[in-house]
Each structure stands twice: as C-alpha cells, then as structure tokens.
Amino acid sequence: MRKYVGLMLAIVFLFALLAGCINQEQTQTTSQTSFQQKQGIHFYMFGAYYCPHCANMKELITKHYGKDALTYYEVADEKEPNYNRNVEKFTRLSQYTGTTGVPQTGVFVNGSLRIIIVGEVSYELLTKILDESKAGKVLLVLDKIYITEDPEVIKALESIFKG
C-alpha cells in the first residue's frame, strides 16, 4: 500500500511538472487540514523576487499555515541585507539537491526536516506529501521523489535551512 501511494505521488508530481506548473487554484474544501495537523510545521524557502513560482509558494504557505510558518531567503536581490549569506547557504543546498532552480523549500515538522520541495506544488499535493513523511527520513521532491535516511545528510540539510 505504501509503495502504491508513493508511486501515485511521484506520478502526480511528474505529470504536474510536465504540464509546466501545478495550478494553484484552491476551493474552500481544500483547507480541511486541522489546526493540530498544522501545528509544528515550518517552511524555509529559498527564492527569487522575480520568480512567479516562488510567489505562488509563498502565498500558498502563508494562506494555509500563516505568515509565521515561513522563513524566506532571497537569493537574487543583492540589496537584501543577508544576500551573501543566503547565496552561500543556497549554494550548499544545491550541492545536495542537484539543482540551482528556485523555489527550494525545506518543510520541518516539530523542528525536524521532513521534505525538500524543488519547484511549486499544490496545497493538495503538499498535504499528501506531509502525510507520507516520516521522522528520521527526508523526502526530496524533484521530478521524482527521493528518500534519505542518512542522519549526517539530514543534519547537514537541517543546518542549511535553519542555520
């Protein structure tokens, strides 16, 4: 059953990437996630001011999880006070993810990294991925879904997002 759900998530995500972009249109019924499920979730996103996918992800996160649930790192605006630090952290992250595209979003649950999303996803897919995430493992969502259980890699990734 778990393999089937993982395979279905990968297929849905791959289809969305091939379509160019996942539609962010939401209906009122998509906000069914209870307050308890949302507690303890924090997003760390690397993005660029000119990127429409970054803007969509920022909007999705703040709409469904609140403004306090997002820490945003700007990597394209040299006038940003923390620009050099953000770019250095993003460069280290890119060595793990294998891509320099934005947005790249780390999703933490109760202080532990669970998911890294490269690109834009819908709220529905995000909640499904969160439901499948497990402590001690990190899902990397690109054109496919990858999983790592290596504690050293997980610790290094957490320090990039939170450090």
Image (cartoon, grey):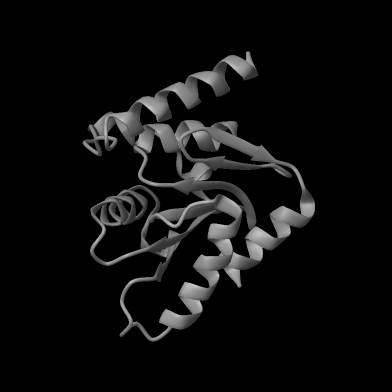
| Residue found at x 47% / y 74% | 86
Q: Quadrant of residue 80?
A: bottom left
Could you tell me residue 128's position as x and y percent?
48, 31
Q: Quadrant of residue 93?
A: bottom right
Number of numbered tags placed on the structure image: 0
| Residue found at x 45% / y 54% | 104
Could you tell me residue 72's position as x and y percent?
41, 67
Could you tell me residue 39's position as x and y percent?
52, 50
| Residue found at x 54% / y 70% | 89
Q: Work out whether 138 lies above or below 104.
A: above
> In the shown orientation, is residue 2 left or right of residue 68?
right
Image quadrant in which the N terminus is located: top right
> In the shown orientation, is residue 71 left or right of residue 19?
right
Considering depth in this image, is 110 or 95 the residue closer to the camera?
A: 95
| Residue found at x 33% / y 51% | 57
Could you tell me residue 129's position as x and y percent?
51, 34
Image quadrant in which the C terminus is located: bottom right
Q: Quadrant of residue 125?
A: top left
Q: Work out whether 147 lies above or below 163.
A: above
